[in-house]
Amino acid sequence: MNKLKPNFFSAPILSNQKIGKNYFCLKVKTPQNIDQVEPGQFAMLRGKWNYDPLLPRPLSIARAEKFQLDFIYEVRGRGTHLLSLMQPPREIEILAPLGNSFPPPENSLPLLLAGGIGFPPLYFYQQKYGGKLLAGFQTNPELDLFSDKIIATDDGSLGFKGNVLQLLESCTEINNYSTIMACGPRIMLKQLKNRCSPLQCNLFLSLEEKMACGTGLCHGCAVKSRQNDYFKICTDGPIFKSSDVNLEE
Amino acid sequence: MNKLKPNFFSAPILSNQKIGKNYFCLKVKTPQNIDQVEPGQFAMLRGKWNYDPLLPRPLSIARAEKFQLDFIYEVRGRGTHLLSLMQPPREIEILAPLGNSFPPPENSLPLLLAGGIGFPPLYFYQQKYGGKLLAGFQTNPELDLFSDKIIATDDGSLGFKGNVLQLLESCTEINNYSTIMACGPRIMLKQLKNRCSPLQCNLFLSLEEKMACGTGLCHGCAVKSRQNDYFKICTDGPIFKSSDVNLEE
Amino acid sequence: MALKLNTSLAGQTLKNPLMTASGTSGHSTLLSNYFPLEKLGAFVTKGVSSNAKIGNKPPRICETPSGLINCIGLENPGIKFFIDNYLPQFPSETLPLIVNFFGNSVDTYIKAAASLGQIEEIFALELNISCPNVQKGGILFGSDPIAAGDLVEKCIKATQGKPVFVKLSPAFSNFLETANQVMQAGAAGLTCFNTYPATDIDIQSKSFKLSLGKGGLSGPAILPLSLLKLHEIHTHFPEVELIASGGVNTAEDIIKYILAGANAVQLGTSILINPTSPIVLLDSLKNLCLKMGINNLMNLKGKVKG
Amino acid sequence: MALKLNTSLAGQTLKNPLMTASGTSGHSTLLSNYFPLEKLGAFVTKGVSSNAKIGNKPPRICETPSGLINCIGLENPGIKFFIDNYLPQFPSETLPLIVNFFGNSVDTYIKAAASLGQIEEIFALELNISCPNVQKGGILFGSDPIAAGDLVEKCIKATQGKPVFVKLSPAFSNFLETANQVMQAGAAGLTCFNTYPATDIDIQSKSFKLSLGKGGLSGPAILPLSLLKLHEIHTHFPEVELIASGGVNTAEDIIKYILAGANAVQLGTSILINPTSPIVLLDSLKNLCLKMGINNLMNLKGKVKG
Ligand SMILES: Cc1cc2nc3c(=O)[nH]c(=O)nc-3n(C[C@H](O)[C@H](O)[C@H](O)COP(=O)(O)OP(=O)(O)OC[C@H]3O[C@@H](n4cnc5c(N)ncnc54)[C@H](O)[C@@H]3O)c2cc1C
Ligand SMILES: Cc1cc2nc3c(=O)[nH]c(=O)nc-3n(C[C@H](O)[C@H](O)[C@H](O)COP(=O)(O)OP(=O)(O)OC[C@H]3O[C@@H](n4cnc5c(N)ncnc54)[C@H](O)[C@@H]3O)c2cc1C
Ligand SMILES: Cc1cc2nc3c(=O)[nH]c(=O)nc-3n(C[C@H](O)[C@H](O)[C@H](O)COP(=O)(O)O)c2cc1C
Ligand SMILES: Cc1cc2nc3c(=O)[nH]c(=O)nc-3n(C[C@H](O)[C@H](O)[C@H](O)COP(=O)(O)O)c2cc1C
Ligand code: FES
Ligand code: FES
């Protein structure tokens, strides 16, 4: 694959709109054509504010086409709150594309499992390559992106009542898939890894950890490897074969 | 005078527009009627950003009517730059009104001398009470507020070429005024104080110093008094009789 | 169940753990322009000394990233003026008053402690040891644990029984030893901490931004530094009553300090930015406790895991 | 007249005073993805030790107001791996390479110094003394001026003549004494400073935000602290070559440190936020010098007034 080199640029905001309960979609203009960006890759974003908050925030790329990058994010803390206030014509500092990506489909389409704000890279994957996407949320995300049928909510306010793994068991045969890709809270990924360990499938996980640089410089984003040393999530991942990482530490 | 107590409130921005070379006019809505605000009083303003910049910024009140406060400011550093980016419907934290004020005219109208961004309180005064305003700038401020005839610029790009004191000598008889009010750089105020010391006039100066609180709590904004201890500019001033302060320290 | 925010210091119950930090709310009741002072757990005055001090030349403050450096210079009208003119303004029945004081020699410290010790309306004293000892060639009291212990012992004797909290400087790496000495000398507890020595330079004029060349750094920037040191003190001396001071600007910050071991928390720079901050924080502290299912705030004291 | 940005360290001329700070640009030439490394005055590697270290558990970083706390744990592949695999990547002809190293005992420090001392491609070493001495029960080398001086002397002997800069910890109030001892021991100069011990607490989980319970604070928040200390060192030891490290994020910050006495300036956290920051700052440094009428940047060294 012809991987794009990461690039640091100041990106004019095209739009930054609320698209759901606490979800926003940010679209920016890029200085170069970024058609080659692959689902699973991410970017580091920072508004042009002063030194607080200091660090850029990692966000998965939700769509990349020609000179436009889209992100879908949840407002969680100070950084994403400030981000949600940024409107055109302001610009955002972006370092992208970063990290590896989910493998493109080979023989059959994969099962895509999202937990909470884990859906953007899988949504991108599905839009680009297809695959069966199931997404779990705590409560109705009020998003206009998915059919209710593929949604699970913990409180039952939309779609299936339960988590995404329960939805999976209720609606499809996990054995039908030779490849599963997932992104979501660590606890969900652990459960999924356990569920899949007796099966023959390839399980790819997108991992998160606090990041300072996103570029392999700081060694901040560690995850234990099978060999008992540490991977850097930002450059060795964020996508890992589940058997390569030790999620128990 | 029935002085308004200072009040801390979150004020919706009505507008925040560029009105000159590097000058902006910010208009905000206030929760209470502020008709009683007097020219010379100021406010502490802080955008709802995070901890950097940390301190609110002091700005003179340029107009106060019913439920609206106007400020005129120059973009100088990080705080005023960030302020200039704030647009409705965002809100600004304001503590106002603060400090004392220029005395209202008694028998005759005063001479009002402004240097640089010192003009807003004197402009307010003139609008409210009248008086002869002369204003000096380094270069053409590109403001639509004044007639060219009352302007001096160091580089001669607008009005009289020279500083405001030279303009004064060239166009009017300083002895005609029993009261002079001034706001501007410390160096201009010192020159003016020297110029007026042999005269009979009352000279009122609006002083500036770095401020943290604006409310007398921190003792940050000191100016030497005639008695050789310190006034607090924010509560003892910002308007002082020139003979009460020692500007030489 | 009702939410309990009260805490206790030196045997006295405070309504809540919030107090002003010395030097950020003046010597008088100016702050009551913004909220009823009785809402506070306690009020700490700006530092006073036997003789009046006019303070340093301007500029006295400068802003840094998420911080504020000051070199006010302990400006104060002197203890007598304070007692005669400002003290009577305080509602001492309903608001525990803590008076911060200092000297420039052992004798002037003792003199101050003696004058303040007699005043019934004062709940406790806060002894600022970050000051230079003129008799010892300007060595800071806070830098020498033995000298600090000795000073505290003498001041406590002079106060005739009023609780004395010692406000430590974070600038000295032997602060644990100083904590130990001043507690052995009879201090009621410790205020952790004063500001950090710091400076900034104006590159245009090529000179320091503060008249004194340096000052003390306060504000959000220092919270992670003081939080660690306070927790170290709590770990070594778990019985000691600690008043946190440094960078508190939110209800979350208050809870951090309590989890680290604080009995009470001071608001300094936060009050300068917003004089209503104590009541704003009190409100949000209540909401946060409810959300977190906390019904007795002080149950969290020292409960950080790890 | 052409603008002169060059500086000199240990007799070598550097194109400009900008270098990477150890640990913020890795062990290899990863950063060359973002700009040609030869633009730098020098490159400082992340710390290496004789034996590989896997580093600490996550979480290893947390953000604070205008700051960053890290407890990476000196993760490194060991000196042999570094020399064999990463060192050859560097354009050592055009880019002075400074290798930061550490140990956990006098012996492992010496061993590291000896291995690195032989390598011709290395311009100088940076000795990190902020590490615990396992032989002395975990006491930090940096806390004990005599032990630090002794350590430095032995390491210098082992390097057979390569310049050794000693990177001081700002956590100890006796840093002037440490500076004195390590310079007497033959150090080429000092790097001022490493990070500040700090912590943060997550109130929801009631636990520390970092796996180790604490870490080192870097970023803009610490600039006013390190700037003062560097100036104090410069005042006491005006002849000593100083490399500033701490909170530099703008061209103004670089000039502040030079005015305070620095010969060179490291960029740490700033590179993490923006990997192109060295060239961005170099550009704005040039513009600023032109605007300020400076034609030889190093003429400003130590020139702060007051
Ligand atoms: C590779 C990767 C891809 C991601 N993709 C998305 C996405 O597409 N959409 C989305 O909404 N979120 C995504 N996240 C999570 C997102 O980075 C965090 O929600 C965001 O950083 C929170 O910032 P904040 O300032 O709002 O929150 P804070 O107030 O800083 O903290 C809120 C929470 O966010 C976490 N967090 C804070 N900073 C970071 C950081 N630098 N790295 C990781 N976690 C952090 C904290 O642990 C905390 O639990 C991704 C994270 C990673 C590592
Ligand atoms: C009573 C009073 C009334 C004022 N009225 C006006 C006004 O009507 N319009 C206007 O444009 N300006 C006014 N000023 C000046 C204004 O406060 C500063 O220009 C502003 O604070 C600069 O902030 P900054 O973040 O943009 O600049 P910074 O980057 O912080 O610094 C730029 C310059 O502003 C000065 N400055 C920074 N902070 C303060 C502070 N807290 N107090 C005083 N000076 C500071 C600095 O010394 C520096 O020279 C007034 C100041 C005072 C004290
Ligand atoms: C303007 C100012 C004046 C201060 N004056 C005093 C003082 O007189 N005595 C004292 O012990 N501490 C003084 N301090 C320190 C504060 O009481 C407090 O310990 C410190 O600012 C840290 O808390 P903060 O980050 O909440 O401000 C002062 C601080 C500031 C900002
Ligand atoms: C993620 C990270 C890793 C670091 N690793 C090292 C290291 O291995 N050795 C060292 O001497 N300093 C290390 N430091 C300290 C930096 O080199 C620098 O001295 C410090 O961060 C202050 O500078 P700054 O504010 O520009 O980041 C590290 C700092 C950070 C942020
Ligand atoms: S975030 Fe810095 S190495 Fe991964
Ligand atoms: S600004 Fe705080 S006392 Fe004037």
Image (cartoon, coloured by chain):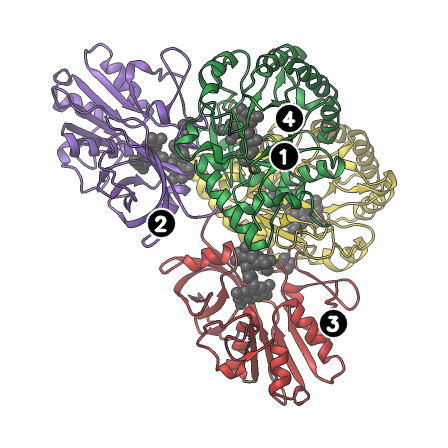
Chain colours: A purple, B red, C yellow, D green
Task: Give the residue pinned by disc 2.
Answer: A91
As helix, strand or loop, the secondary structure at mark 3 comes to helix
Give yes or no for contact between labels 1 and 3 (Cβ–Cβ under 8 Å): no
Q: Which residue is mark 4?
A: D165
x%, y% of residue A30? Answer: 29, 44
Q: Is residue B1 visible?
A: no
Q: What residue did someone put label 3 on?
A: B244
Q: Determine the residue positioned at 47% across, 57% down.
A: B81
- Name the secondary structure under disc 4: strand
Amino acid type for the residue under numbered disc 3: Asp
Disc 3 to disc 4, C-alpha distance:
55 Å
Q: Look at the numbered disc 2 and give the secondary structure of its residue.
A: strand
Q: CA distance from mark 1 to mark 3?
A: 53 Å
C-alpha span from label 2 to label 4: 41 Å
Residue furthest out toward the front: D1
Q: What chain is tagged by disc 2?
A: A
Tell me the chain of label 1: D
Measure the alpha-carbon separation of dots 2 and 1: 39 Å
Foreground disc of the pair 2, 4: 4
Q: Would residue C36 be found to the left or right of residue B240 on screen?
A: left
State whether residue C277 is above or below residue B225: above
Q: Chain of mark 3?
A: B
Instruction: Report the image quarter containing ligand 5.
Output: top left
Q: Nearer the viewer, residue A143 or A70?
A: A70
Tell me which amino acid carries mark 1. Answer: Ser
Tell whether D231 sits left or right of C283: right
Same chain letter for marks 2 and 3? no
At 59% from the left edge and 76% from the top edge, which residue is drawn? B162
Tell me if mark 2 has few (under 14), some (14-19) or many (20+) residues whose alpha carbon lies within 10 angstroms of its own. some
